[in-house]
Image: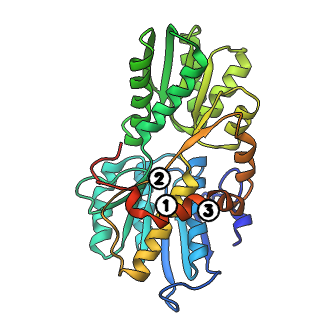
Amino acid sequence: MSLEAVMHPRFRTVAAALVLLTAVGCGDSGPGEGDRLDMGIAVANISLNFAHEMVLGAESAAEHAGDVDFKAVGPPNTDGPAEVQLFQNLTTRAKDGIVLENLDPPIFTRPAARAVDQGIPIVALDTAPTDGSKVTFYVGNDNYALGELMAEEALKRLGDDPEGEIVIGVPNPGTPVLDSRAQGIADTFGEQAPGVKVLGPFQTYSDPGQNHSSWSAQVNAHPDALAFLGVGDADSYNLAKIKKAKGGKWLTAGFDVDPKTLEAVEDGSNFVTIDPQHFLKGYLSTAMLIESVREQDGRLPDGWFLSPGGVVDSTNIDDVIARQKSAEAAYDWYRPAIDKLLGDRAGSMHPLEDPR
């Protein structure tokens, strides 16, 4: 299947199987020529943009490496136990390595440890591994810093010494990466805007329908709020939708680069979106996994490989929309960062206990 075929605003899911299979095997053979690898990625919600981006990045890295059969799995809705089952099924096929992203780390501790015991190299992606999982390599953002970034962008637009309320929403409370984003927002307002009262974080759910209902309730409960800020991708486009429907004057923003979110930034409904650059993380994690198998007998680094994120606003929205048109366009846009990060890996490595 070509990369053009898998680039779509939403994953083409096969509901009965809950998997997307992409076999990639073109390109120049690297080290280990003649040894075709069976690998894969498991994600928490194959229907949402953040997972779509990670899988596209992973598939791109597998294609560029060559001779890799690559399979992506994940439930159509955020469902930790369902993802555990899909991950366990994947271990029977992807014997040469798996990239694991999830939103419920504790329930993956034993399944991940069993996979490592079976000799399968596992890279944790986006969510740091738990103690006991035996996974020692993690690729992810500094999510607390991304939360700080969102708050700083909001403060630029609220003027000097703002007073009032802001409302923070988290789709899945208890998920470390999301909680870290919310904490970064709250702490920044607490430090830089003492006249602002932070409400929440409230649960907003990852399911788009539930998310819309949750945010509608918060907007109705706090009609005079200065801003409504979410830390997930459904938060972004649902807040924009509600703001348009109500003619709201408050600030709204969320995370990720769902097409509806980019439209909201383009038309000014949302002042920014924070981009964790999921394609980049998917690419980096898979490229390093493949290299470790082919050149280092599966020995992965120990630690946290810090992957960057950024702000999408009116100044760069056109470039980001162009980036999102295809996997090839995304790779071309990210290639300088990929080359830099893979060329100086030590510069991005941090202790495994440090992620936030």
Q: Is mark 2 on a helix, strand or loop?
A: loop
Q: In the visual, does 9 lie left or right of 23?
A: right
Q: In which quarter of the image is residue 314?
A: top right
Q: In the visual, does 219 lie left or right of 89?
A: right
Please say if 189 is above or below 314: above
Instruction: Rate crowding at label 3 as few (under 14), some (14 to 19) or many (20 or more) other CA atoms within 10 Å.
Output: few
Please say if 119 is above or below 59: below
Q: In the visual, does 298 lie left or right of 133?
A: right
| Amino acid type assigned to the residue bearing label 2 in the image | Ser
Q: Is mark 3 on a helix, strand or loop?
A: helix
Instruction: Rate crowding at label 2 as few (under 14), some (14 to 19) or many (20 or more) other CA atoms within 10 Å.
Output: many
Q: In which quarter of the image is residue 111?
A: bottom left
Residue nearest the observer in this picture, 274 or 161:
161
What whole-number distance in Å separates the C-alpha atoms at marks 2 and 1? 8 Å
Mark 2 or 1: the one toward you:
1
Instruction: Rate crowding at label 1 as few (under 14), some (14 to 19) or many (20 or more) other CA atoms within 10 Å.
Output: some
Specify which label sits upstream in the sequence, 1 or 3: 3
Task: Name the residue: 45% across, 8% down.
Answer: 195
Find residue 307 and name its label. 2
Task: Name the residue: 63% across, 15% down.
Answer: 250
What whole-number distance in Å separates the C-alpha atoms at marks 2 and 3? 14 Å
Task: Name the residue: 44% across, 16% down.
Answer: 198
**Viewport quadrant of the N terminus:** bottom right
Report the residue marked by disc 1: 341
| Amino acid type assigned to the residue bearing label 3 in the image | Arg
Q: Is mark 1 on a helix, strand or loop?
A: helix
Report the residue marked by disc 3: 335
Specify which label sits upstream in the sequence, 2 or 1: 2
